[in-house]
Image (cartoon, rainbow, N blue to C red):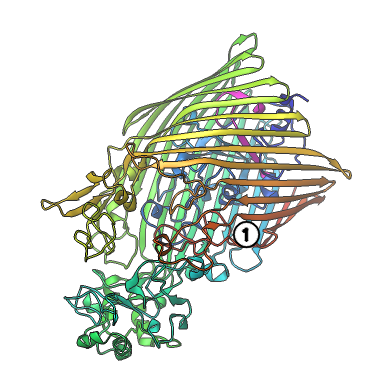
Amino acid sequence: MKLKTIARCIALMGISASSSGWVLAQDKPAPAPQRVEITGSSIKRIASEGALPIEIITRKQLEASGIVTAEQFIANLNINGNGSDNLASNADVTSGAQRGNNGASSANLRGQGADNTLVLLNGRRIATHGMKGSAVDLNSIPMAAVERIEVLKDGASAIYGTDAIGGVINFILRKNYNGLEAQAFTDISQQDGGNIKRVSVVGGFGDLEQDNYNVLLTATHSENDALRGDQRDFVNTFQPNRGLSVDTRGTPNATVFATSLANTILSNKSNNGPVFPGTTQVMNAINVLALPGGAGCGAIDGMAAYDAKLWDVASSKYACAWDTGRAAVLQQPVKNDNFVGRATFKIGTHQLFAEVVGSQVEVSKRFSPNQVSPGTNFPASSFYPSTGSAYNNVFNAIVAVFPSIEANRGAPIAYRWRCMECGNREITTKTEAGRLQLGADGQIGKWDYRVGLSRAYSESESRLGSGYNYTVALANALGTGVINPFLKPGEKQSQAALDLINSTSAAGVTLYGGKTTLTQADAALSGEIWQLPAGAVMAAVGMDIRKEEYTFNGDARAASVRPAILNAPFDDGNALPKVSRDIRAVYAEVLVPVFKSLEVTVAGRQDHYSGFGNTFNPKLSFRYTPTETLLFRGSYNTGFRAPSFNQLFNGITDSPYAGKDLADPATCPTLKVDSSKPGCSSITPNILTGGKTTLGPEKAKQGTVGVVWAPSSNFSANADIWEIRKENSITTIDLPTMLANYELFKAQFLRDSTGAMIFVDQRWVNAGSAITRGVEIGAKANGEILSGKWTAGLDGSYLLEKKSRPMANAPYGESEVGRFTFTGDLGLKWKHTAYVTYTRGDWTGTFTQIYRDGYKDQVLPGVQNGLIVPSNYNPTVKAYTIYNMSVSYSGIKNLTLTAGLKNIFNTDPPFAITYDSNTGAGSSWEPRVADPRGRSFTLLANYKFK
């Protein structure tokens, strides 16, 4: 059979020639091929005739795989990167740009980041998430109404403009539906927690071909239950024998700290803490449970000894730590309601339509209780007073080991305390999104046209739940001595203490909110312009006019009434009353059949932004079939991403460096604080963060070359090698990188007239560069056995190179392939999905393997500095492999049942040396790679009423 015929058949069954790793659904025979517009091109043609690698996943394939949310779909897509873009990896305390991800899930094709992946709905843009304002929230996609998903594995700025560097995902909704059907789905985990359920109804009447009209309505409600860290045994941050322990000394039984704020039992104005007898080592963090003869940190549930060697903090030898992972939410609870209404009218060769899409998503982010620390928020007046009931117990236990503190008897106690009675912190984010689309498409003579006008918005608001307290009120309450931070094992707070804590609660306060609005008009025209001996030359031209608007309030409270709330991430410094920009674009595309076996497509787009001016992006692609069984394809293009509103307009935030571990890189070559060495004393400069109105767009050059081989109708294979080179990346350079490359970043370290460092400038800049290169491969085979039909396939992604540099004049860093990174994309070398399906009569069975490669793990400071080698230390995170299966039965009239088993062998996420921190989530596992739910059972019932 000819390759073209094979590819056409594959495309009509819902899978592209790029080889999907999705289960092949047995759909009914499709009608004769028609010219359609495929994602990545504006020229209508037969689907199989394109030159770009496109993966098409049908609704039936999603249902057979037990996938009901867009986030689940993205997690199973091999071309998608492993970034901090899902609800699991953003479940704990986060900093910087990640803070704006509250309640959002985003796509990250080829690991280029959510901001570099374009998400379309029915081929047109939708509003980005109202909170962050720079990437589409996949939770707003009405998955129950999706007919198919087209994934373009190539850059597409020459057609779509900004954001399409990593690729394009186009969610295409059902159309021309006649009838009524209801669907119910449940996904129940075996070990409790994290259950998923969805109900939906689809109704339609009228037929475009017979009645010249169709009206379609869909409504869906879905819920994801919370999965807590204490519901899974693999969550355990205290595994020092494997190189992991938590770096927090805020504990339910408070750890006593030295401080320079006032005379306390561990410090006075002339020292920083007691010296352990017989040594010169100063101790500035002591928990009485950890002292010789004490009950031990583990006497209180969730506590263990602070591993001073792993973290290379000798001054905390007698401190305790608390497992933040047990309080984390591994899967955030989500409630999602969405609606789609579409009316289409056919007049001759023209179709006119109006479409309304709306959603409401509520996500509750929950994580560990707050910790109270000595500092500007909690002054000396809040320290535990000498008259408190626990004072003598604490002081006498410490003075027995450190006799030198006897002189401080009667001074208050400064401490770091985990306020368990305050409850886990919770931030609930509600997002409403919608789009009204009016449009028409059809034919005028031999030309196809498309026009549209739309208005879309996404509005988000975050509200504080439990776990947040008014700072001053809590500080005053602690200073009374009624609240006891030093409870012994088994003791509880008095009712008076609980009432006092509750009186300081800030639950219900609106944190902040944002809204994005997109107004767009577009038009495109395509058709044949002349004939060549090899075939018709086809062309398309189009225009796109958009207005993008964004508002962010930073703190929804009245400016005159804003009492501080402990560790609540208000962001008033970045409030944007209303900012907007206008975009005008024109583009053109021409397909030339040079020979019968070779076609070349040239495209280009000119965009004008009211913020930074013009950018032009071309694209050249080819499709070559030297034989009937062999196809070569390739493309070269440039792309760009416009800076987000936050990156452009955020205000400058001036924050003092809170740690005591920073030394001046100009005078301290070791970068390690050591007051005994000249120039290596601790410094605390202010850190400047925020936007820059002078930012320009990120730019990219990328190319793809691939081959498809189809020697018979029963087998095909493909491979595509690709590379993306990004320049002028908009980035904030982290402090460790700036310190390690001080000569490159001298200008960012601002000093006063004496040479003392007073500021570190970490604002957004166009500075970074990155190179990413990989190979995507696939294979499919099919046949017949035992009166049934079988299909098998493999879809894989191999990452060859991933490296970056902070500035153009800096050398590229070491390869990030297969190596832990704190934030952003985790570059796994190899990922694949393999599947087998078998259909006989009314039965269809599927079996799927999902594989994610291992990588070099994070290394804690003590191991990195050679202070300790844990007994069971393994520097490599193991590969993660799970198996799924499902069985579908359609032998009952109007009813289809699909039962599935996910993670058949109940495989836990592999152990990883990470923990919940200010850069992301995860406690002894990596949420960017693995699913924490374990084995689960799925059941989907679909009933058609007529």
Residue where numbered disc 1 is placed: 197
Residue 897 seen anywhere in this rendered image of the structure: no
Question: Seen in the image, is 832 located left or right of residue 1?
Answer: left
Q: How many marks?
A: 1
Q: Residue at x 32, y 37 (%)?
A: 809
Does residue 360 sit above or below 60 in this rendering? below
Residue 33 seen anywhere in this rendered image of the structure: yes
Q: Residue at x 85, y 40 (%)?
A: 784
Does residue 329 sit above or below 802 in this rendering? below
Furthest-front residue in this view: 278
Instruction: Look at the image and say whether residue 517 sits in the magenta stretch.
Output: no
Furthest-left residue in this view: 753
Residue 609 screen position, x and y as percent: 35, 31
Residue 97 screen position, x and y as percent: 38, 51
Q: Quadrant of residue 904?
A: bottom right
Q: In the structure shown, which secondary structural element does the residue marked by tag 1 occupy? A: strand
Identify residue type, mark 1: Lys
Furthest-right residue in this view: 786
Magenta residues (range): 40-59
Q: Using the image as rendered, state which of residue 425 and residue 186 is in the foreground.
A: 425
Residue 924 screen position, x and y as percent: 51, 64
Q: Using the image as rendered, state which of residue 556 and residue 209 is in the foreground.
A: 556
Question: Seen in the image, is 67 located left or right of residue 757?
Answer: right
Q: Quadrant of residue 555?
A: bottom left
Does residue 247 sit above or below 628 in this rendering? below
Question: Seen in the image, is 36 located left or right of residue 821?
Answer: right
Question: Seen in the image, is 327 located left or right of residue 149?
Answer: left
Does residue 122 sit above or below 223 in this rendering? above
Instruction: Look at the image and say whether residue 53 sits in the magenta stretch.
Output: yes
Residue 84 screen position, x and y as percent: 47, 52
